[in-house]
Image (cartoon, rainbow, N blue to C red):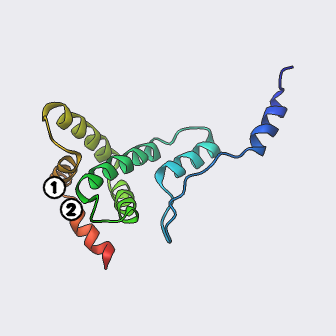
Amino acid sequence: MKNTKSQLERIVSAQRPTEVHFPYYNYNNGFATHLGMKYRETGEVNIELFLRSNAEGMVRKGINEKFRRSISSRETDLLAHHYASVLTPDQIVRYKDYTVFCKTMLVGINFTDILESFLKKESITPVEEVLAGLRR
């Protein structure tokens, strides 16, 4: 027996998708959550939210390599969200391309060096300064 569209709509509406929220006080939802919410509203992928979601993950990887033992996962998430918010969509694309280029051409370079180099090149506040501001 085939399901009609109305039957499928009832099944889907009864089983809402799980949303990912960062479990910290006063923390904005991650960009992946915003992307999913916007997609459910409009039925289209928001390119800017998609880029910011990717940037959040890339920056988190760069921060984790250097600060893994010295900062909490909460601070890592806040820093990743901060940089994903600060970077423009063009900068995010350049950062992605820069990361691919560096990992391809420079054997042994890590994601922290790539992140720090990119932030310096783009004149964006370094991670240490933003982290110091978070801890005040």
Give the answer, above or below, for where 71 lies relative to 21. below
User: x and y percent of residue 129 in the render?
Assistant: 22, 69
Amino acid type shown at disc 2: Pro
Question: What residue do we see at 75% from left, 39% from top?
Answer: 12
Q: Hey, which quadrant is residue 14 in on the image?
A: top right
Residue appearing at x 28%, y 55% in the figure: 63
Mark 1 or 2 closer to N-term? 1
Q: Is residue 136 above or below residue 87?
A: below
Q: Is residue 25 left or right of residue 87?
A: right
Q: Please state, as top left, top right, bottom left or bottom right, where the C terminus lies in the image.
A: bottom left
Q: Residues within 10 Å of mark 2 (few under 14, many from 20)?
A: some
Quarter of the rendering occupied by the N terminus: top right
x, y (%) of residue 9? 78, 37
| Residue 90 figure quarter | top left
Query: Which residue in the protein does label 2 denote?
Result: 126
Residue farthest to the bottom, as pictured:
136
Q: Nearer the viewer, residue 119 or 61?
A: 61
Which residue is at a point 48% across and 66% down the rendered structure image? 27
**Which residue matches tag 1?**
120
Number of marks in the image?
2
Q: Residue furthest front?
A: 69
In contact (CB < 8 Å): disc 1 and disc 2: yes
Q: Which mark is residue 12?
A: none
Q: CA distance from mark 1 to mark 2?
A: 7 Å
- Please name whichever residue, 125 or 76, is drawn nearer the observer in this view of the structure: 76
Point out residue 35 in the picture as x, y percentages from the top left corner: 52, 47
Local secondary structure at mark 2: loop
Q: Is residue 109 above or below residue 117?
A: above
Question: Within the image, what quadrant is residue 7 found in?
Answer: top right
Amino acid on which the number 1 mark rests in the picture = Lys
Residue 6 in the image: state x and y as whole percent: 84, 33
